[in-house]
Image (cartoon, rainbow, N blue to C red):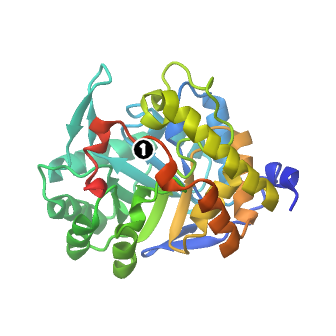
Amino acid sequence: MDTQALNTKTLNSKTLNSKTLGSLTTSALGLGCMAMSAAYGEADRGESIATVHAALDAGITLLDTGDFYGVGHNELLLAEALRPVPRDTYQLSVKFGPQVGPDGAFLGVDARPAAVKTALAYTLKRLGTDHVDVYRPARLDPKVPIEETVGAIGELVDAGYVRHIGLSEVGSDTIRRAAATRPISDLQIEYSLVSRGIERGILDTCRELGIGVTAYGVLARGLISGHWSTTRGGPGDSRLANPRFTGPNLEHNLALVEALRGVAAAVGITAAQAAIAWVASRGGDVVPLIGAKTRTRLAEALGAAEVTLTAEQCAELEAAIPADEFAGDRYPAAHLAMLDSER
């Protein structure tokens, strides 16, 4: 396989296969838009919009955002990018719940029924649309039973403002309770070669209930992309507070990435393509989200759609970069403690 050909894959081919997330059929890869709103340092607005257009031209239909990404900036950016695009050619997956002050301080999660409906009203206005395709709480609100939150989204489904209900970073018990309230399309959760907690029961629960998975962090926030180094990162890059990106942990992890790069090269692909293809290989109900904010990174990631890994190749990748040898938690301790999926 020609690595250079994969890196320069034409972006207007519309050759992506589809996958099924519950009752939602979508593209086999999705575009995660968070990094376009400064979470990983500054992003170029024009390049971000061009990247959205390139993703759509390549056959990606699933666009993932959150009302708290850049405190509304990401939704406004997507509205600008999507203005000339027919609404029935793409799907919007939106997260809500985290509360942020004007100083950027995190104020908790609000998933009360009234807050759910108010948040969607603002989201629809910012996005310039009359509905979203998937609506989900970004985190479990410990003060509100999941049945109440999902029930409120269900009322929005009944009213036509939402098409499907999703969940994010919750455990098996919460998934079961939510699914007993209303049909759930998918669970959004971190899933990569080095973040495999979902395999300890959560994935089985989803499959038992017919719930798909949208996997974010498939490149461990860029750490296993083959592009990160000890000199990367800058002002406003939240990754620099992540345990995996600091001190001895970073040096240890980058050494493992070199092993990943070696296995990928033997297959004829890049480290990033190997990592994405590995997540995609987990099943027809698992859709990796590509967190690209430039057309260059998008083009490389799209090359993963051309890769079908054998069982032997998957095993070689897992041996090269074992999840239990990767140093540092996937979030800082305070953030990790908020994740129902980690309990």
For label 1, the crowd category at 10 Å Cα-Cα, with few meaning under 14, some 14 to 19 and many 20 or more, is some
Please, is residue 214 above or below residue 312 in the view?
above
Tell me the quarter of the picture where residue 89 sits: bottom right
Whether residue 306 can be seen here: yes
Q: Residue at x 75, y 51 (%)?
A: 262
Question: What kind of element bears circle 1?
Answer: loop
Q: Is residue 60 visible?
A: no
| Front in this rendered view, residue 334 or 313 | 313
Residue at the spot of label 1: 330
Q: Is residue 11 above or below residue 67?
A: below
In the picture, measured across the screen, residue 152 lies left or right of residue 266, that is left
Q: Amino acid at mark 1?
A: Arg
| Quadrant of the snapshot with the C terminus | bottom left
Residue 284 higher or lower than 166, as above or below: below
Residue under the image location 25 percent in, 45 percent down: 338
Residue at the spot 42% in from the left edge and 74% down from the top edge: 22
Pinpoint residue 283: horizontal percent, then vertical percent.
55, 74
Q: Position of residue 57 (x, y in %)?
A: 71, 54
Q: Nearer the viewer, residue 131 or 333?
A: 333
Tally of marks: 1
In the depicted view, which residue is nearer to us: 123 or 159? 123
Q: Quadrant of residue 207?
A: bottom left
From the top left corner, tell me how far across and down residue 60 is, in percent.
63, 58
Residue 256 drawn at (x, y percent): 62, 45
Instruction: Reply above or below: 242 against 138.
Output: above
Which quarter of the rendered picture does the N terminus lie within?
bottom right
- Taking the spot 49% from the left edge, 40% from the top edge, the residue there is 34
